[in-house]
Amino acid sequence: MLLRTAISRKSSRGLLLRNYKIYEDTHGIYKLLKTISKTIKIDDKILKCGKMLDKHYLPPRYPNMWPSGAPHEFHDLEDAEEAINCAKEILELVKRNIK
C-alpha cells in the first residue's frame, strides 16, 4: 500500500508542477488533489480516494505508530485492494490531464 500511495502522491505533485507550475510541500494526496481541483474538475470519488490513501500512508511507514502490534495486523486484503484501485484512478486522472 505504501508504494501505491507514494506513486499517487508523486504523480499528483508532478501534474501540479508540469501543468500549473505549483509546488505543494505536503505528503497529503488529498491536499494535492484539492489543489488540482482548483484548475480541473475532479470527481468526489477521487477526492475520497485521496483521503483513504492518506490514512494508509503514515502507519506502515512508521511501525511504532500503533500502540501495540505490527502494521500488518491493522491492514487486510480488502484495504490493499481498495488502495490499489484508488491509486489506479488517481494515476488515470493524471494521465488524462498531463500536458
Image (spheres, grey):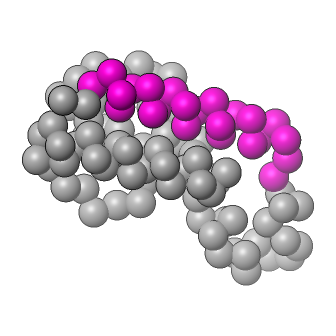
Q: Residue at x 28, y 19 (%)?
A: 41
- Left/right placement of residue 92 relative to residue 1 reads left
Q: Residue at x 81, y 52 (%)?
A: 75
Tell which residue pokes out farthest to the left in this image.
21
Where does the magenta region start and end? 75-97
Q: From what the image shows, is residue 12 above or below residue 47?
A: below
Q: Position of residue 37 (x, y in %)?
A: 27, 30
The answer to whether one can see residue 48 in this image is no
Q: Residue at x 84, y 61 (%)?
A: 72
Q: Position of residue 80 (x, y in %)?
A: 75, 42
Q: From what the image shows, is residue 18 above or below residue 43?
A: below
Q: Position of residue 33 (x, y in %)?
A: 35, 38
Q: Position of residue 77 (x, y in %)?
A: 85, 41
Q: Is residue 6 magenta?
A: no
**Number of marks in picture:** 0
- Left/right placement of residue 79 relative to residue 10 reads right
Q: From what the image shows, is residue 53 above or below residue 39?
A: below
Q: Nearer the viewer, residue 78 or 66?
A: 78
Q: Nearer the viewer, residue 97 or 26?
A: 97
Q: Residue at x 65, y 40 (%)?
A: 83
Q: Quadrant of the C terminus?
A: top left
Main SS of the magenta segment? Answer: helix
Q: Is residue 85 magenta?
A: yes
- Left/right placement of residue 72 relative to residue 36 reads right
